Image (cartoon, rainbow, N blue to C red):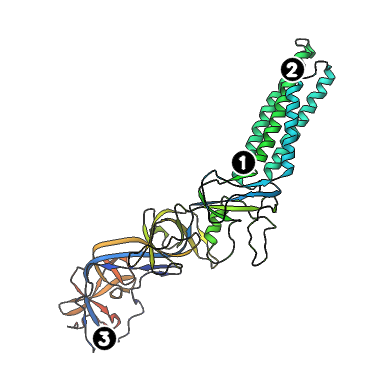
Amino acid sequence: MSGALPRTHRPFRARLRPGVLALGIVTVVSLTAASCGSEDDGITVGTAARGTVDEIVEAPGSVTARSAATLSAPAAGTLAELRVEAGQKVSKGQVVAVIDAPELEARRESAAKALDQASRGGGSPGLSTSGYTSVRRKTDKQAAAAFDDARDAAGKITDPNLKGVLLKQVDAAQQQYEAASAAPAATLRSVQRGVASLGEAVESLSAAQKLQAQQAYDLADAAVEALTLRAPAAGVVQLGGPATGGGGTSSLTDLLSAGSAPAAASGATLPGVDAAVPKGAYVAAGTPIMTIVDVTQLGLSAEVDETDVLLVEPGVTATVELDAATGASYPATVRAVDLLPTTSAQGGVSYRVRLDLAAGTYDDETKAPTPRPGMSAVVRLQVRQATDAVTVPASAIVNADGQDTVWAVRDGVYQRVPVKVGVQGEDVVQVTAGLQSGQRVVIGGADLVHAGDKASS
């Protein structure tokens, strides 16, 4: 008989995929303690044993911060105060910078004078019906201009949360004024029908004027108040906006892009020049002043290949190695697996897996350094484990006509035995059916074996 292995017979291999690697770990029990072989025939025989097999999915990843937000200039002006330094820890609500915007401050001052005049005016008792109508239309026009100015100021704010709050405030004020403005109009109709006096109408109009003046001031004051930048959360200060470009910053950039302001169009700087805005410098609306990064709980973002993602679920544990901390190991736990995929430049499909990262240690149990957001990592996810299982080396499994088999030694001769494979490691696999612990099997030179041949002693 020929010594070549038939084309339908091929050695078993652990699953190896681009970017994702399956590894195996066997503990407690030695798998091939009874292995033996003949120097003449090139066949090695070992013994199936009981042990533990871990199936590991390996994926590239990067360290992520819990959250991050970029504070940007809400209006054109000057960076009047910068109360923090790079790397400084700040608490939520702490004032970190103040922008001086003369246009907004002048608008508030004008609104304050109008409010004072409205509060002292008390209406014009001598108005005629036509004069009353003219004053009411003027008041409505002033209110509309105030709302337009407030929306324009809010629209220049790049912080989506702050912008949303101010726009809601404008909408609420406009609705309140429209309700108040309807009262003078109704009173005038009553005057025209002879059921109310013009004095009552003037009093109603005066109330609407005071409300309009108060709202104009409140909206202008809110726009000026937004010039005082406060930390939206506790964290560490990084001056300027989120870093862009570079090898390991993509995950941090992704994290920041979900809830932070975009960099200003004029944000480009010369090489070797600090991109941070210095105190006293002019800033356009939207210029990033600083980024507050919350690092109280670091995490990981790993890209798992589609062929392995169904094995990953919340609660799966992992070990992490960082390019920046050679020899250190960090434990991690899967928090969530994204439903929608990402596509690589090479066309491969993967899914983002989010993990919680714990403190790491070196082999000698000394404390490993704390990672920084954006650092590259290799994540090894323990997706399956078989304990006290019948195990054989991966080299013992031979696929014949689509069926996993082993060459077992029975009655002193080699016999092909169909088996079922469970958890698969790189070097060792679990056999769930067809083989018992203690049975002798071929673990090397399977391509030289023929059914019925006398087994090596």
Q: In the rendering, which numbered label is found on residue 42?
A: 3
Q: Is residue 251 above or below residue 415?
A: above
Whole-number angstrom distance, CA of label 2 to CA of label 3:
110 Å
* N-terminal-most mark, 2 or 1: 1
CB within 8 Å, label 1 to label 3? no
Is 290 placed left or right of 51 in the picture? right
Residue identified by numbered label 1? 164
Whole-number angstrom distance, CA of label 2 to CA of label 1:
35 Å
Image quarter where the C terminus lies is bottom left
What residue is rendered at 78% in x and 24% in y?
136
- At label 3, which amino acid type do we have? Gly
Tell me if I can see residue 307 in this picture.
yes
Q: Tell which tag, 2 or 1, sits nearer the viewer.
A: 2
Closest to the observer, 76 or 38 = 76
Is 138 placed left or right of 54 in the picture? right
Q: Position of residue 307 (x, y in %)?
A: 43, 63
Q: Judging from the image, what secondary structure is the residue with disc 1 in?
A: helix
Residue extending farthest top: 195
Disc 2 crowd, CA 10 A, few/some/many (<14, 14-19, 20+): some
Residue identified by numbered label 2? 203
Closest to the observer, 339 or 11 = 339
Q: Judging from the image, what secondary structure is the residue with disc 3 in?
A: loop
- At label 1, which amino acid type do we have? Gly
What residue is rendered at 64% in x and 39% in y?
166
Q: Position of residue 71 (x, y in %)?
A: 60, 49
Image quadrant in which you'd find residue 135? top right
Disc 3 crowd, CA 10 A, few/some/many (<14, 14-19, 20+): some
